[in-house]
Amino acid sequence: MKIMTMVLTKTEIDLRNLNEAEFERLLSHPNPETFTLILESKRKRFFIGQIAYLARKREEDDVVESSLSFTRRAIVFKFLDWVYHRASTGDLAITTIEGRVRKTLDFFHWCDANNYQDFTQDAELGSVAYRAYSDHLKERVRLGEMHPTYASEHQGIAEDCLYWIFPTFQPESLQGIRRIQASSAERNATPVSDENDTAKNLALSQALFDGLTDFLINNAPFPFQLSLPNETCWVLPCQQWIRPAFRLNERNYTPNWSWNYETGQINDIDFIESKYQKGRSEAAKMYRRAQKNLQEANSNPHHHTRLGLAAWALKSFSFLFCNNVGGNRKSFLDQKWDIEWKYVEDDRLPQPQKKSIQFTTIKPRASRYTSFKITKTFIPQFEKFLKLRDFLLNGQEFEYLFFDYDQYGAIKKTSPHFLQTYFHLARKLLDPTIANISTRAIRASKGDWAQNNHRPEVAAELLQNNIGTAQKSYATGNETSQSLEFSNFFEVLSSRTGLIATDRPNNYTSLSNGGCNDFGKPKSIHPNAPTEPDCKNRGSCLWCEHFVLHADEEDAHKLFSMRYVFEKLGEFTDSSTRKNMIEPTIEAINIFIGKINSSGPDASIFLQRAESRVDGGYLSDYWSGKLDLLLDIGVIQ
């Protein structure tokens, strides 16, 4: 039986000239299966509506009419929404979006051609299809049919699809699926953000956070004046809550003439009637409505207009926090929190050469969650944020430190595009010159500044990683390697006594790769060790006399996890670093694993379990975080 195909009349969407009003109209279009995107040039069209059909001819854009899926039509709208907002916010360049659209269509084509047509129905089916697609890409790489970098890009786009198709998709669903490694030669250095842009964004964010948070937690009344970097504006209890000078003359769209944005007062009925020309009775209704909103907003601390301002305060603090901590995007999104937290003074930090920077470690419930470091001068801001957080949660609990909060009170995990969204809204409402700054650019700028103003140890602390990573990933001209003679070093390491400890005395400190019996007093086991032991660099602990291990699954899991991360680092570092640092570290780990294996008859059983956990993608908390960091900043792929 011959299957009849048809060529649809397309609905062309010129993304370069698409405004928000036209985009909103498209979301109610009766035939999204006809959507065709025009991106960089009119010669390049992408028939995205074809994904509504489960059967089609890929090359000719022909579709099988009877295969139209009504559930897939909703996916077309989601696809358009994703593309439009990446373009309109400046999150991605048009040329980048073009490549992602093409790879997204490739993923849909493969799934529909390989019996995974139902992958858009729920997250579990989506994860199954993603795993199969990843295996397909890996096989093509193995056969030499696809370059690893190209395959890695396809795999990344397929993962992105799951997040915009399923808004509540959790990364835990993909545990155990290894990412394809791209060629290290094709990785680009992370660009630093412009100093003027950073200063402008920081000034605006600080003004928003301080002004709005003080207003909210003190339950101050509307209207009030908010001091912005270049002007002072009235904040009013309405949807258009503020109008800086550049927007006062742009009141054609939702002008809200009920309020006077220059005086902070409600306009009189005569003025409202003259502007709207809807008759006096209608103007009187608008006047009374504005009065009612003012009264309700001032009598309810959690009124929806106040929660709308709270969302702005949260977004502004997000940028301030990222700039201070220098953490990557994933660590920000996944930072857990609990009411039990404490400051930990870190007096082991070196004295910087030029300026004084003191760090404080924040540890939510000590060992249960990952800690992070902030500068001491940032502590008052962080404590103010915690008050805002308590005010917003209003007795509720939320496991993550940060969250999105809409004006209707719904709490949700922060979007991965939180900074791009914030800067996009700030450009429209507050300052048209605000630039996009990504978390990667923040980290790069922070590392660049720290390398130029402080010793490398301080740069590493600012970036929340070890010295080698900071120097290699975020500083130019700082990649050095030494030729070290190991001679009988490994022989000394193998014959070392006292490595396997039998207990955990009072002076014992648990580490990410084992333990320490005298923390803070590093002492090298050999003059030819790859690096001098340093208690702030966990990788160097292996070369210290005080480093100890326990013959149990916990320490075995730490070692296997560390070895996995260093193996990945070895694939993306220069030959000198690999020879003088990575390979000796892996060799030392293998020696230590051998010593654990020789410790008793049951050791091989828990060693096998620990290694299997790592092979399945379940690394220890510390090394899992390090791996996520290295992936997020592009050190490994």
Image: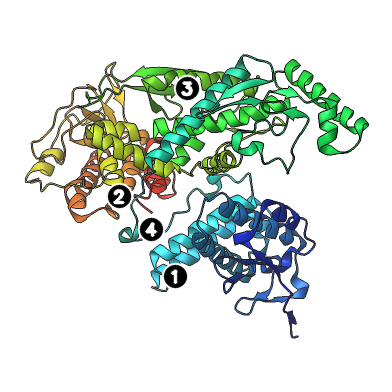
| Residue at mark 2 to residue at mark 3: CA–CA distance | 34 Å
- The numbered dot on residue 382 is 3
Mark 3 is on which residue type?
Answer: Phe
Q: Is residue 54 above or below residue 496?
A: below
Q: Position of residue 257 (x, y in %)?
A: 77, 33
| Residue at mark 2 to residue at mark 1: CA–CA distance | 24 Å
Q: Position of residue 238 (x, y in %)?
A: 73, 29
| Residue at mark 4 to residue at mark 1: CA–CA distance | 13 Å
For the residue labelled by badge 1, is the local secondary structure a helix, a strand or a loop? helix
Q: Would residue 606 be seen by someone viewing this image from the given angle? A: no
Q: To which residue does mark 1 refer?
A: 140
Q: As rendered, which of 14 and 389 lies closer to the eye?
A: 14
Mark 4 is on which residue type?
Answer: Gln
Mark 4 and mark 3 in contact (Cβ < 8 Å)? Answer: no
Question: Is tag 2's residue or tag 3's residue first in the polypeptide sequence?
Answer: 3
Mark 2 is on which residue type?
Answer: Leu
Q: To which residue does mark 4 refer?
A: 181
